[in-house]
Amino acid sequence: MPAEGRDTAAPTASGPATDRVNALEQINARLQRMRDANDTDPLKLEQALADLERTSGMKTIGGVDIGRLRDNLVVVAQMQRLTQEMEPLRKKGSALSEAERSQLAAKTRELQTLATRLSVGTATPRQAPSETRSRP
């Protein structure tokens, strides 16, 4: 028989660990909604990944360097903005003024510079399993 006044119910999870799990579930749900809606906004994704990195406390998740991926998403957003700015100039074709040609050339150079900032290696190298040698 349990002692009087003592709580015999199993302890429930609460506190920072539960808060962290709930936050991670919310981030996962947000990422799922983005995927389901085909939302490819790189800045929204970067923010979700920043929240994931901060909440999980991990810099690498699923073999992916989250910081590098986030940096790439910021660069992609800048490249998208530049491309949108360049589109009206491109549509003018040969009717561009000298100032517009110069502006288009400058934006093209900036786009090329941004492309060099993209980090190709966002996946972290997997550790090779230890070699085991059998003796003859």
Image (spheres, rainbow, N blue to C red):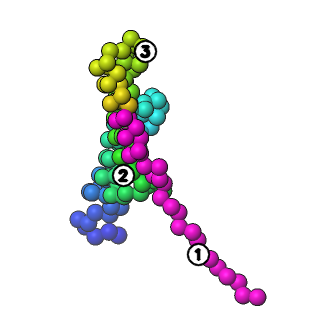
Classify 133 as above or below 123: below
Residue carrying label 2: 67
Q: Position of residue 114 (x, y in %)?
A: 37, 40
Q: Please report the residue visible at 41 percent of the width from the left and 45 percent of the height from the top.
A: 116
Q: Which residues are magenta?
A: 109-136
Give, as a three-letter code, the residue at label 2: Gly
Q: Position of residue 13 (x, y in %)?
A: 33, 57
Question: Foreground residue, 103 or 42?
Answer: 103
Give, as a three-letter code, the residue at label 3: Gly
Is residue 115 shown left or right of residue 4? right
Q: Position of residue 79 (x, y in %)?
A: 37, 34
Measured in 3D between alpha carbons, the distance from the residue under mark 2 to the one under mark 1, in whole angstroms, is 28 Å
Is residue 43 shown left or right of residue 36? left
Residue carrying label 1: 130
Which of labels 3 and 2 is toward the front? 3
Q: Earlier in the sequence, mark 2 or mark 1?
A: 2
Residue carrying label 3: 93
Which of labels 3 and 1 is toward the front? 3
